[in-house]
Image (cartoon, helix red, strand yellow):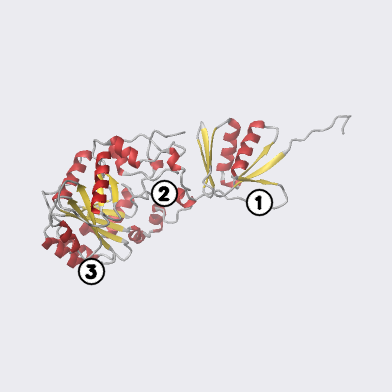
Amino acid sequence: MIGGVLKSYKMKYKIHIRSSVFFWYSDNNVLFYDTESASFLFIPLSDEIQKICMILSNPSSLYSFVYDTENINVSQFVEELISKGFCVEDDGKESLISLPPILCVNNNWEIIKKKGQYKLVTELLKSIVFLMGGSELETSIERLEHLANIEYDLKGNALMDLSVLDAFLTDNSITQLNRLSFVIGAKCSSGYIDKLMKLVTKHDLENKVQAYVLINSSEEGVEQLINNIPIPVHPVFVSISDGPSITLAGSIFLVQSKEEVNKAMEFISANQLEDCILYPQYNGQNHSFYECEVFPNIDELFENRISKRQIFIHRTLNVNYFGQLIVLPNAQVYSSLLRPAIGRLSDGIYSLVYSEMENNYLWRKTRNMLSRCKECLYCDLCPSPILEEELMNVECPYMVN
């Protein structure tokens, strides 16, 4: 009591945001997401909340901020954070500390180059897809050439030179690879397939290799051909029509419309096929179907918990394609079939992977590099971009900033 007047004090509190919580903000809104509870909070951004976000963005704040209870807007904001379990209130009885979820990427390409550890890049390659050739495969490649307005310099119905493949497998260590996939048109001669299987045996690759055989449901002799291949085989139905029954488990059906989905389901049921997959395929004319079947909406995005690891991965690499190369029948090697070749099979793994890491055609293409996505608050939560988005020139209808 001074001069008969009671002195008033502002009540100040310190709030620690949990380390499991990420947040993103723009000029308009702020989004908080907890990777442990899968809860989120999306609210408009006021001047007071923006100041708090700026404080939290500074690592030296240790993911904490101080507020006073006289500010009603901030108090309500804190109450929402507390109700979601996104923060801890510091009562002064114990020493609390929270670290913001910041990722230090040890294998960052610039760090690798600065240290001169270039040979490490060969360890990044995890799978190679060899498009061996055949009329069915040629048709698929021609469709992509038309959609992307590019040319792959392939001769009609060309098959990969197996001596080139043999030399590659001889000259390069592939112990770090998890998988080699051979995509073969069913009309390839049995003699060619036999020679390919001998290469698999010669290089002791049986445990790393799988084959995908492109077929039409009406073709004769396909089942016997596949059963004679001594490695895991996935039949890939490029079309379904009336014809011989095929009873092959593990089949993949390329579908381009709801009608083809229904037809595939009927075919699977009629032939009692097991472990089948329906794979939506973009053909340039089925934009609505593909978008509906493949692209998630915001509600679906939050159906499953998104881990801290997933968010970090979305920020640094494209999980759909990282570590994968594609080899065309002419031995040209690509990381992305929508970008220039990174070399030829004869160049070797080191040169090929170095080229992709330096050019970054696909492996490290993340949403924060796309003009339509980088300003969106959901950028790090959305799945990595796929090539069809570029072909379709997709503009995300759910973008929020």
Residue at figure coordinates x 28%, y 39% from the top left: 258
Which quadrant of the figure has residue 173? bottom left
Q: Label 1: how many residues lie within 10 Å, few (<14), some (14-19) or many (20+)?
A: some
Residue type for callout 2? Thr
Residue at figure coordinates x 55%, y 49% from the top left: 20
Q: Secondary structure at mark 3?
A: loop
| Of 253 and 109, the residue lying toward us | 253
Q: Are marks 1 and 3 in contact (CB under 8 Å)?
A: no
Q: Label 3: how many residues lie within 10 Å, few (<14), some (14-19) or many (20+)?
A: few
Q: Secondary structure at mark 2?
A: helix
Q: In the rendered view, would you say 300 is above or below 169? A: above
Task: Determine whether, in the image, residue 48 is placed left or right of residue 220.
Answer: right
Q: Secondary structure at mark 1?
A: loop
Locate residue 52, reporting x and y percent: 60, 38
Task: Determine whether, in the image, residue 361 is placed left or right of residue 375.
Answer: left
Residue under pointer 1: 96
Q: Can residue 379 be seen in the rendering of this structure? A: no
Separation of residues labelled 2 and 3 (CA atoms) = 34 Å
| Of 49 and 189, the residue lying toward us | 189
Separation of residues labelled 1 and 2 (CA atoms) = 30 Å
Residue under pointer 3: 203
Locate residue 386, reporting x and y percent: 33, 44
Residue under pointer 2: 316
Locate residue 141, reporting x and y percent: 19, 46
Which quadrant of the figure has residue 188? bottom left
Residue type for callout 3? His
Residue type for callout 1? Leu
Q: Residue furthest front?
A: 270
Q: How many numbered badges does the structure rendering display?
A: 3
Q: Can residue 213 be seen in the rendering of this structure? A: yes
Separation of residues labelled 1 and 3 (CA atoms) = 57 Å
